[in-house]
Image (cartoon, rainbow, N blue to C red):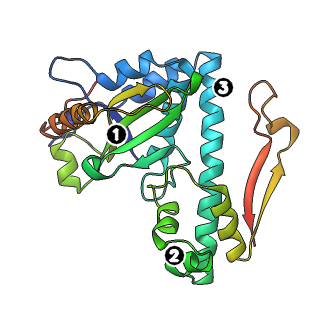
Amino acid sequence: MADSKMLDVSLHERRRARRMEEPEYRLAYERTARELAQTDAVIRDLDSLRVDLGISKAELARRVNRNASSVRRLFTASQVRPEFPLIAALADALGADLRVVRRPADARPSMRESSTKGRVTASA
Amino acid sequence: MPWAVVYYKAPDGTTPALQFLDSCPGKIDAEFTAVLDAVAGAPPPRFSGGGKWEAMHGAMGGWYEIRLTGPGREQFRLFCLLENGTHDQLTGRGLQRCAIAVITGMRKPWRTTFAERDYQRVRELGDEHRTNYPRRIAT
């Protein structure tokens, strides 16, 4: 099919740009994006650490007394609510700590905007 | 973004997902949009879900939903399909790259459940979407 027959898929971006002109919408969007990025980063860090250590998902699950499927779901797109106790247990099993790191002042949302103060990281 | 986000358009010209998003509180609309952008930016299996993106199971296998909680704990759901495949498959659908197809949304009070006929309606829309070559989407 020639490019001229390709669909215009720009509506989503145009709609987002229009809605972002509303301050409350923008704040909610940016807060959610930060939360998603933080959750995703912690899980990615843990999975990278697991790979670096050469530990399979099944072995990691065994070390934290969980079903292999629960750990596999966490590292794929099918986990709806990552449980913090599981995250903490996995970090411990991988020899890592979870820490809350306060952002520089100019990178913090105002108290009114969000209660998010820093980011959680996994470090070994 | 690596993937596009497209909105299914029904045969009568309406766009169920956009109608749903427009009916949501602004903050919920913003959150849905942020999740869609996060998934489109790091599509499955890279994206962990961030606690809001879920692969559905059972009769809804193959679907993904975004789950949000609004004022008064009202529950908001946005139902999506993934448009991925080979270059030729995507081209046949009128897509130059993979996409998240946003089909429709639903809301319900806290501690209630959607009826099977509600999910059936979602599946019917998705089935209709997938019969279209190229896809019928809102532009």
- x 55%, y 26%: residue: B70
Label 1 crowd (10 A; few <14 / some 14-19 / many >=20) = many
Question: Are there few (<14), some (14-19), or many (20+) residues within 10 Å of tag 3?
Answer: some
Which amino acid type is marked by label 3?
A: Leu
Residue A114: give x, y in percent of width and height.
Answer: 74, 31
Residues under numbered marks 2 and 3 in contact, where contact means CB atoms less than 8 Å apart:
no
Residue indicated by mark 3: A27
Residue B28 screen position, x and y as percent: 53, 25
Position of residue B135 measured from the top left corner of the image (x, y, whole percent): 19, 35
Q: Which residue is drawn at 12% across and 38% down?
A: B133
Task: Name the mark on residue B80.
Answer: 1
In the depicted structure, whether residue B12 falls above or below residue A33? above
The residue sitting at 30% across, 32% down in the picture is: B115
Kindly identify which chain the residue marked by label 3 belongs to: A
Q: What's the residue at 43%, 59% (across, down)?
A: B45
Q: Which of the two marks, 3 or 1, is nearer to us in this view?
A: 1
Q: Quadrant of residue B81 in the image?
A: top left
Alpha carbon of mark 3 to alpha carbon of mark 1: how far?
A: 24 Å
Give the residue number, with chain letter if any, for mark 2. A57
Which is more toward the observer, B120 or A14? B120
Do marks 3 and 1 share a chain?
no
Q: For the C terminus of chain B, which image quadrant?
A: top left
The reply to whether dot 1 and dot 2 touch (C-beta < 8 Å) is: no
- Image quarter of residue A44: bottom right
Residue B98 - label: none
> Do we see residue B1 in this rendering?
no
Please identify the residue farthest to the front as the structure is shown: B111
Q: Is residue B98 above or below residue B33?
A: below
Q: Circle 2 marks a residue in which chain?
A: A
